[in-house]
Amino acid sequence: MLVGCIVASLNHNYTPRELTHALNISKPKIIFCSVEVSSKYIELKKQLNYVDKIVIINSTASVIGADTLEEFVRKGLGGRRVVPDNFRPFVGDPVRTGAFILCSSGTTGLPKGVLLSHKNILTRVQQSRDPRYRDNLRHNQLGLLPFFHGFGLNITLNGILNKYQIAVIRKYNEDLFLKAIQDYRITVLHLAPPLAIFLEKTHKIFNYDMSSVQTILCGAAPLGKSTEIGLKRRFKNLKDIQQAYGLTESTLGVTVMDKGVSRPGSSGKVVSYMSCKIRDPETGKSLGSSQVGELCFKGPMVMMGYYNDEKATRETFTSDGWLKTGDLGYYDDEEFFYVVDRLKELIKYKGFQVAPAELEAILIMHPCVRDVGVAGLPDELAGEVPVAFVVKETGAEITSKELEDHVAGLVSPEKRLRGGVIFVTEIPKKPKRENIEYRVPLKRATLKNCIEKSTNLKFD
C-alpha cells in the first residue's frame, strides 16, 4: 500500500479451481504466500501469464519457482541493506486510489472483486476511534477472524493503527480459543455468530477465566436474540454486546450498536459518516419506519466498484447512487435497525459467502445431473448449510454421497454440501419475458416445499 500497490487478499484454503477464478479477477504480478500453500501457486504460475513472481514469506529455505522474502527484498534494494534515502511513498487521491480487492459474491453469481479505496479504509479507521462505539483505552483483541475476510482484515488493521495488542491464533481450536482469551486478557472479542453460539452453549467456558472480556462485537451474519441474552449471563464483567451489520461492498459494518445500549436482536444504528434508506425492491420507493424493504447505503465507506466489472457495478447501485445490499430489514421509531431476510441468492455458512450459482455450475457439469438448484438450509450453529436439489439424467445411477464428494473435491471447506443432496423430479422455475425460463431463487418457502415433496419429512 505504501508504494501504491493494490492488495488482493485470498483464502488460503481455496482449491486450484477457486484460486484460478479469484486470481483472474485481480491478475496480480506478485503473489506473497506461506510455504505451506506455495505449491498451489507455483503450479498456477505456469498457467497464468500475468504472474511474474511468487514470494514465500515464512521460510528461508529455497523453493524452486519462488523467492524467499529475504531474496525478494535484497533484489528490490539492488543489494543494499537499507531503504535508499531518496525513497518516497506513493501519493495519490485517496478517493480514486485502490487499496484492497476482496472477494464477494455481491447479490448474485460467482465471486467478484470488491475494490476498496484508501478513503474507504481511512474512514473505517476513524470510526474505530468514535467514542460512540469504543473508549480510548488500550485494548487487547484476538486475531482469530480470517485476515483475507473484510471483517478480519479491517478489525486487525484498525487494531494495529490504534496500538492494541493482538493475539493471533493460527488455527481455530476450542480450548486454544478459550485459553487465549484467558492468557492474553482479551478485552474486546470480535466474533461471527457460530463462535458466539459456541460461547453461549459450551461448558468448557467454566474451565477458563473470562473476566477480562468487556465487549463482544458480532458481525458477518445476524445474531439471534436468545444467544445475545445467554452471553450476557455467562460473561460477568461484560459491558456491551454490539451487533453490527455490514458487507464487503461497504468496507465493514454500516450499522452498529452504540456502547452502553442494549437492543437484543438489533444491529444498531447507522454508523458515523454514512446514510441508509429502506427501499421497496419492486418499486424503488423509499419506506418509513417499521416497513420491511431492501437496505441501501451511501457514503465514504461504499466501495469504488467491482474491479474490472462495470456491468456488475451498475447493477449493484441505484440510478441515484445508493448501494443495494440485497438484504431485507427495517428500522424502528428510534432508528435501530433489524435485518430479517435476504433478497440475494447467497448462503452464509459461518459468516462465509457461498454462491449457489458456483455450486450449481459444478454439479450441472456432472454427467449424471440434468438439472440442479442449491439453497441454504437453516442451521443453528453454522447459520446456513448448502443443500443441493438434483434432477438425475434418465437412467443415471448416482448416490447423494458421490455427488457430495464430487463437490468437496473442487471447493474449499465452507462450500461443501453439508446440507446434503436431495433428488427431485424437477427444479421450480417460472416464466419471464420473451418466454425464457429463469431459475427461482430457492428461498425458505420453496426449500420447505421441495423437501416435503421429495421426502417423508414434514416441517412446522
Image: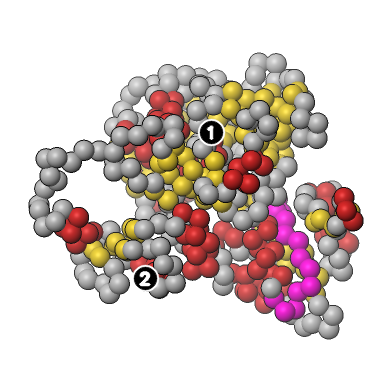
Q: Which residues are magenta?
A: 366-385
- x then y, percent, for residue 121: 42, 34
Which label's residue is closer to the chain start, 2 or 1? 2
Q: Is residue 273 above or below residue 308?
A: above
Crowdedness near tag 2: few (<14), some (14–19) or many (≥20) residues, C-alpha within 10 Å: some
Residue 20 placement, left or right of 56? right
Crowdedness near tag 1: few (<14), some (14–19) or many (≥20) residues, C-alpha within 10 Å: many
Where does label 2 land, which residue?
42
- x then y, percent, for residue 24: 49, 60
Instruction: Please check the rendered image and state whether residue 373 is part of the magenta-colored stretch, yes or no.
Output: yes
| Residues under numbered marks 2 and 1 in contact, where contact means CB atoms less than 8 Å apart | no
- x then y, percent, for residue 453: 88, 62
Q: Is residue 143 above or below residue 43?
A: above
Quarter assignment of residue 55? bottom left
Q: Is residue 283 above or below residue 199?
A: above
Picture residue at 40% right of the left edge, 57% below the top: 28
The kind of residue tagged 1 is: Val
Picture residue at 37% right of the left edge, 70% below the top: 42
Q: Is residue 26 above or below residue 66?
A: above
The kind of residue tagged 2 is: Ile
Picture residue at 63% right of the left edge, 30% below the top: 322
Where does label 1 land, which residue?
302
Residue 11 placement, left or right of 70? right
Q: Secondary structure at mark 1?
A: loop
Quarter assignment of residue 428? bottom right
- Is residue 315 or residue 267 the one in the foreground? 315
